[in-house]
Amino acid sequence: MKIITNVFHQLGRWCEPVIEGIIRLCGISAIIFVFGIFFFVFREGMGFFFGGLDIVEFLTSPEWYPTSVSNKRYGVLALVAGTFSVTALAMVLAVPFGLGAAIFVSEFCGPKLKETLKIVIELLAAIPSVVWGFIGLTVMNALIIKIFKVPIGLTMLNGGIILSLMSVPIIVSIGEDALKAVPDSYREAAEALGATRWQVVYRVLLPTAKNGLLAAVLLGVGRAVGETMAVLMTTGHAVNMPLGPFDSVRTLTATIAAELGEAAVGSDHYRVLFIIGVLLFSITFIVNFVTDLVIKGIREKA
Amino acid sequence: MAQTSNATKKIEIADLTVRYDGLEALKGISFDIYENEILGIIGPAQSGKTTLLKTINRTIEFEPSAAVSGSVKIDGTDVQSIRNVNQLRRRIGMVFPLPVGLPMSIYDNVAFAPRTAGIRKRSELDELVERCLQQAALWDEVKDRLNSLGTKLSGGQQQRLTIARALSHQPEILCLDEFSIAVDPVTTMRIEDILKELRSQITIILVTNLVQQARRLADRTAFIFESELIEIDDNDVIFSDSPAHRLTYDYVSGNFG
Amino acid sequence: MATDITPSSSPTEITDPSLMFTATEQSRKKQLMENIARAIFFVMTLLMILPLVLIVVYLFVKAAPVLSPEFLFTNPAKGMRAGGIWAPLLGPIYIVITSLLVSAPIGVLAAVYLNEYARASWFTRIINLAVVNLAGVPSIVHALFGVGAFVYFAKMGRSVLAASLTLAIMTLPVIIASTKEALNAVPMAFREACWNTGATRWQTIRGIVLPNSISGILTGIILQVSRAAGETAPIMFTGAVFFKAISERDVFAYGLFDRFMALSMHLYQLSTQVPGVPEALEYGTAVVLLGAVLTVNALAIVLRVYLRSRKRW
């Protein structure tokens, strides 16, 4: 008996470095995967990136004719404009509502209502993007045609509304966290001076939590830029420089999703889609990096 | 230093300096601790007492900003040179100011350390748990509910549970850091009685903010002030009208601190 | 309200005590502003939530004609224009299980590393930054990665395995984040108490940290079940297909290297690629997907509330 226990004890001593090694390996897995994503996406697009693609045209031309027989053009400017116009429209709608709701949930409602609203918001955040796309395609499309008397409802406006609905839960929950992080003593001090709730929010909370709220908005932007299925289904799929909310547009993400299935593996068209992937990866990388710096700024101050 | 010349040295501390981010928490402290004595360590808050205990069992290593120089020797071996730090920690029982009942049953609280040390036999564990709880004067109160949560005990009971856990790995040295801060006076008296009984078996280091507690319990007492060791001597010297340092007299008699 | 007390007149002149609490013009205005602000924020919150609740109700009403057990357990038929959703319903179950088998252990151990082993250093900061960035990578870029790395480079082809691994990497950072939060909720004092008895780091983690954070960890993983089940873009090119008939009585119909149908992809195809699909079929598919996702999330919420109510310290 004693021998067996001893063996287990010895085994334990041997196992522990092994377990710790595995844990360390998993710990750095995130780095491996981030580089892996960049590497493999770039690897597929590399052949065209170094052989044939006119980078200047790629970034500055609005002409995207990847399947034309005589006059192939690979300009993503219209797609970039599509992505940013839809995102901007979504943020115009989502930021006031998101922050307003965050303030309401955090400062103005009772504990019961707060708990309920937070659960509803959490459930909203869970709705799959393809279901959002479906809602845009059916409900929102019909509504836009009816209300604005336009022939087609699958437009920048539709995509923007759907994207804003998708981003709002993130903005609310992160924004609420930021407001929660403001110490209660600030609120109490302000209220002791006779300030009303609204004055507390306006004069104390918003200035104190502004970095956290900015981070919430940036995370919303990140989600909107990267969203694929919902914009693919709602924005009408036309490669256009967008001029107004009733134009159909196409985003970077939607282009990849729509065309990767049709492009012949290894063709220039196939490769350029991966280069768009690298571009998207870089955009979201920058947005996330800035968000991280903003959040870090809060921590250092606190 | 009177009685001490013929006793065995258990711990030798030599020129021990600890810095946190460059700020000195202990400045070149040297003294010895003898086997089977109770050494009281007194001094105001923030004077480096807790840091001293942490250097003995090397939990100071969990403070990323701490830098240690000088040596702490146990039975003549420098603790820094011990490869298996967990073995070292098993030789030392630690009780900190706030009682920590682990979120597991009372039985598992006490059996935790023996299990990590490889004891698996139920009968052996049963016996050990009972003995430690007896020693910590908690057995009678909890013997019928060993399976209930350790975290649900009262503060005083949890502190005794912490002591039982500190004894469960059969340490040679028991360090207590202001154990009475979070417990009521009755429990404090009970724990003091326990310490008196344990004195014959192990070496006890009693860090305390209560001067009278050191006077009641300790054989010798060290006075640490602003990171420096002011004086260490037998209790009848430290608590007399004429300790070596005026500062000691002032602190002990309550003129400051 | 306590804030109605006004310092406008000096206290010695007041003879009638009730006068002390009379609102002045200024404080009445303040109160009005307060009510307006509260109303505006309430309306904003309502405007955000109410339409969605209505939309969800609308979806259910539209889907009502097809919703039946038969709809769930028969394959799509007649070029997707009839039949049920059996094959697309079974697919996500496979990829959710396979992907979480990969991402849950790696994610949990990565969080253990970050929370329990890593010290504050530039390297740890880079890892954390990588986790944040991984969470922000657009799902379509994950799809491209899946195509490049798993489908072609690792020669898995378009399969359950390739799609699952793609999803695994997508869910990984969120599992890391939620696990870290759960581990962080275990008080430091418990760890210190264990270290002081001579327990090693791993013994402490296994003995105290994991048992007391497992509920939070599980909740985080359950939330990823619904996310993985609802995603479309990452599986579109890595394994999900337009149509694949499978046996209607066999729950083990898909193999690891088979192509599969998925509910999310099916909904996309029905609503954009196939003309002449009966409306109710589309709405039915959307409602089943939405219902499944919301049910799983609601389960996670219930579990969290229940576990919070029986905290052990």
Image (cartoon, coloured by chain):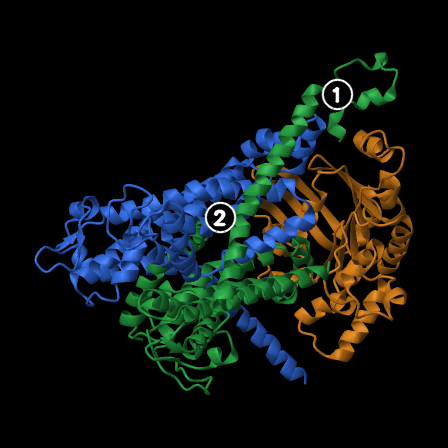
**Viewer-proximal residue among C175 and B38:** C175
Q: Quadrant of residue B17?
A: top right
Chain C: give its colour: green
Q: List x then y, in percent, for residue C282.
A: 41, 68
The count of marks equals 2
Residue placed at 84% from the left, 69% from the top? Answer: B145
Amino acid type, label 2: Val
Q: List x then y, in percent, for residue C165.
A: 39, 69
Residue placed at 60% from the left, 31% from the top? Answer: A204
Q: Which chain is orange?
A: B
Task: Classify the position of the C terminus of chain A by image quarter.
Answer: top right
Relative height, residue C55 to residue C19 (above, below): below
Residue placed at 22% from the left, 59% from the top? Answer: A45
| B141 on left or right of A295 | right
Q: Is residue C115 visible?
A: no
Chain at tag 2: A
| B68 on left or right of A80 | right
Q: Which mark is residue A168?
A: 2
Residue ID for mark 1? C6
Using the rendered image, report if marks 1 and 2 lie on a common chain: no
Q: List x then y, in percent, for residue A25.
A: 44, 64
Residue placed at 52% from the left, 79% from the top? Answer: C69
Q: List x then y, in percent, for residue C226.
A: 50, 66
**Viewer-proximal residue among A163 and C58:** C58
| A203 on left or right of C12 | left
Q: Residues within 10 Å of mark 1 (few under 14, many from 20)?
A: some
Q: Which chain is blue?
A: A
Distance in Å between CA atoms under marks 1 and 2: 40 Å
Determine whether the residue tagged by mark 2 lies in a helix, strand or loop.
Answer: helix
Callouts 1 and 2 close, C-beta under 8 Å: no
| B30 on left or right of A267 | right
Amino acid type, label 1: Thr
